[in-house]
Structure formats: structure tokens, C-alpha cells
Amino acid sequence: MDINLNNYETYLLSFVDGELDEATTQELMRFLKANPDKEKELNVLQMTRLPEERDLVFPDKHSLYRKEEPAVKKTFVLRRYQWLSAAAAACIGLLIVFYLQPWKASPPPIKPTTAVNTPIPAVQQPEKPIPAATDTGSSVAVSKPAEKRTIPPPVKKNENKNLLSKNNPVGKPAEKQEVKATTQDDNEPALATIPVLARTENDAVQNPSIAVAPISLKAENITANVADKKIVPESPSSKTDEGKKEETSKEKIMNTTTVLAMTKKDIDSTITQKLIDLNQKKEGIINHIAKNGIKIGKLTIAFND
Amino acid sequence: MTEREYNRCVDLYADGLYRFIVKNLKHEEDARDIVQNAFEILWKHHDTLLFEKGKSYLFTVGYRNMIDHLRKAKRISLVETFAENIAVKSHSAPDTKAVLMNALQRLNEMQRSLVMLKDYEGYSYEEIGEITGLNASQVKVYLHRARLKMKEYLVKMENVM
């Protein structure tokens, strides 16, 4: 490098800016020694350097400090939003279920009119086995009741509720089971009574002593009675009382079927009443939600018409 | 840059940045707003920045905000007029520092920024170039012109006194 009178100013300025390396600085010093008048120029240029101003400070430095939020808070916020969205989804799901009412389609609603009418054929059904008793085709019906079932004994009206409560000790939630039970019972008394009555009718013709027994018969008892029938020989005196015993047995059977029909009627009416109550409660809940919406903590979901 | 490093940047550079801005704007409130804005932006991106780049980042953001502010407020001509008035008044009570500040205020916005970045903050030509968007050669040329202008003013004032 060569510092001369044509380029010295640039070197002086770079020196003032502190941008000269060691070698160039020494070269410049040698030039200034050789040209002392240029040293004064350097002094003036040095005066253009701004002095330090430590007294001028930012007035509110504390407002600039920052602190990172802990990561736990971020995850909490996410979880809270997730929880809210899940709750909202659950509410919407519940509303859809309430408005669609899928349970309405599955069990047919039992109205009081049908409930009153249904027991009538059930009462009339037991009349059929009586002529069937003489029919030879009834042997098929006799062979079927091998099921180990007992015919429920005659129950008084007051005992019906106790019977219901015994079968369903839980109470309301078991009411659906009661409905199913009644739907089975609609046929069961007829099916249960037909074979048993037919059997007793058959047996009554041959041996009246057997015909008195049958109402709470199990299949085992029947076979035992049949075995007894084979052992006991027929006596000529029994033939004279045959007509009377047959009549009494018929009366008893008729009484039993009537009591059973009454019982069934009571059960049906009780179930119908409970279903009506449930429907009213359901409508009340739907109206309440439609009016007031659903409240989950601070969140309220309102519904328009 | 960690949280601690960011707060270290506040300790180290807030005053310098404020000084740099307020000397240019001559308005403390505006200067404070620009400094706060620069630190907000630094905090916003502190995860992706190195601590070593913190100072130049702050001054780059502050300088650009300051230029925008000056252009919007159109205060450049006003400040220069104001500076000339002060210079006239300062004849009665000459002070080396005041004369130097007058000389500084007579520079244009770019020259003034270059001088302050060099003298107050000790940046190299390359670093000043990064902040102002110039290359190192341009910084050198503009800065030398600024010093010569200041020298001319100082010599003139010395002759008057």
C-alpha cells in the first residue's frame, strides 16, 4: 500500500472509524510524521466522533423483560378445549337421540284401549282346549308340554303388584323387562293352559282322580300321576261319580282361567299406566331442554324452534 | 435464544437502541414505542434466533421502524430546520458537545444513523451494512462523507467563535 497526498484522507477517515489494521496504521503514522500539517486535519476529524452518552437510558426497562409460560399451562388449555368439544358433542348426541326417539319404534306403544281389549281373546282361548280334549289330534298337544313349567297359581288382585315388585325389585329401569314379559305372557297362558288342560281333560275322562291335581303340575308330577294311574285299578264305583267329578273339574278349570285372565288384565293395565307416566316424564324433559337449554358449568346450549 | 438470553439482550442493548432512536427522532415517546416494538418482535422470534445475533436483529428492526416512522411523520425537514435554529441560538453559549450535536443534526437521516451506529455501538462497516441494508463499501463511503460534512461544520463554527 502507498499512502500519499492523493489518498491520505480516506486512510485518515478509516483510522477515525477504527477500520485500519496494524500495518496500515503504522504506515499512516509514518505518513503523518512526514506531513505534520495533516496531523491537525486528523485531530479535527477525531472531533467528529460522538462521545459516549451513558446517561441516556431506556426509562422502563422492566416492561421489556419476558417470562416464558410453562408448557403445562399450554397442555391444560388444550385439554380444556378438548373437554369442552367432547361435552358439546355429547349434548348434541343426546339431543339427536331425544328428537329421533328410536325407542318409540321398537316396542309398540300400549294404549289403554288395546290393553283393555287384549285380555278378552286370552280369556276366550282356554275355551278351545275343552273340545280339543275329545279330539284325537290333541295328542300332539299333550306330547308338547314336556317343558318344566308351572302354571302360576290363582292370584288375587292385590297380590299382582307384589308379584310385579318381586319379579322386578329394581323398580323403574326394569319396566322394559315387564313389557317383554307381558308380550310373552300374552301367549303363554294360552299355550301353558292348553296342553295341561288337554291332558287333564284326557285323563279326567279315564280317571277323574288325576284330573283334580293338575294346576301346579310339573312334567315330573304328570309322569308320576301317569305311573299311579297304571298301578291303581279301575273300580266300578268310580264310573258312577264320573259325571259329577267331571263337572267340578270343569268348573275349577274355568275358575282358574278366569282368575288368570283377570291377573293378566291387571298386569297389562299396570304396565300401560307406567308407560304413560314415562312418556309424560320424557315430554317434560324435552320441553325443559327446549325452554332452558342445557347447562354444563358456565356453558349453556340454547335451542331455537 | 432462551428466555434468559432474551432478558440479557434487554440488559445489554435496550439503552443503546433507545439512544440510537431518540437521537434520530428527537422524540422520547416515539423512541420508546419503537424500542418496545423491536423487543416484542425479538421475543416473538427468540426461539429461532441466536443470542449472538440479538443485537444486530434489534438494531435492524429498530432502524427500519424508525425510518418508517420518519417517513410517515415527515419530520425529517422539520428536525433539520429545528437544528438550524438551535445552531443560531447556540452562538451565544458555544459548547463543543452542542456544536457536535448540531453538526450531527445537519446530516441526512442515513448519514446520521451511520455515524451513531459507528460511534455509539462500535459496529463495523459490514455490521452497519446488515442493519441498514447497504453493502460495506457503501457504508464506508457514506460514513466518510458524513464525517467530512461534520468536520466542515466544526471548522466553520471554530472560525466563527
Image (spheres, grey):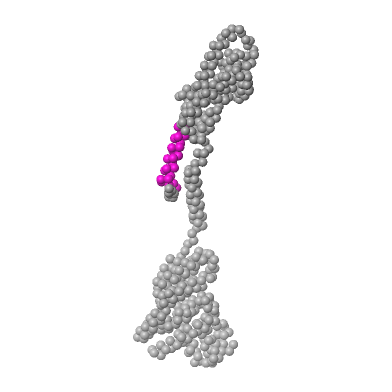
| Quadrant assignment, res B84 | bottom left
Residue closest to the eye, A132 or B75: A132
Residue closest to the eye, A254 or A8: A254
Q: Residue at x 59, y 87 (%)?
A: A1
Query: Residue B7: x percent and y percent?
Result: 48, 66
Whether residue A193 can be seen here: yes
Query: Residue B85: x percent and y percent?
Result: 37, 83
The reply to whether the magenta stretch includes residue A285 is yes
Residue A207 sits above or below residue B66 on the image: above
| Quadrant assignment, res A139 | top right
Q: Which residues are magenta?
A: A272-297
Residue A5 sits above or below residue B3 on the image: below
Q: What secondary structure predominates along the stretch shown in magenta?
A: helix
Query: Residue B16: x percent and y percent?
Result: 46, 73
Whether residue A30 can be seen here: no
Q: Is residue B31 left or right of residue B127?
A: left
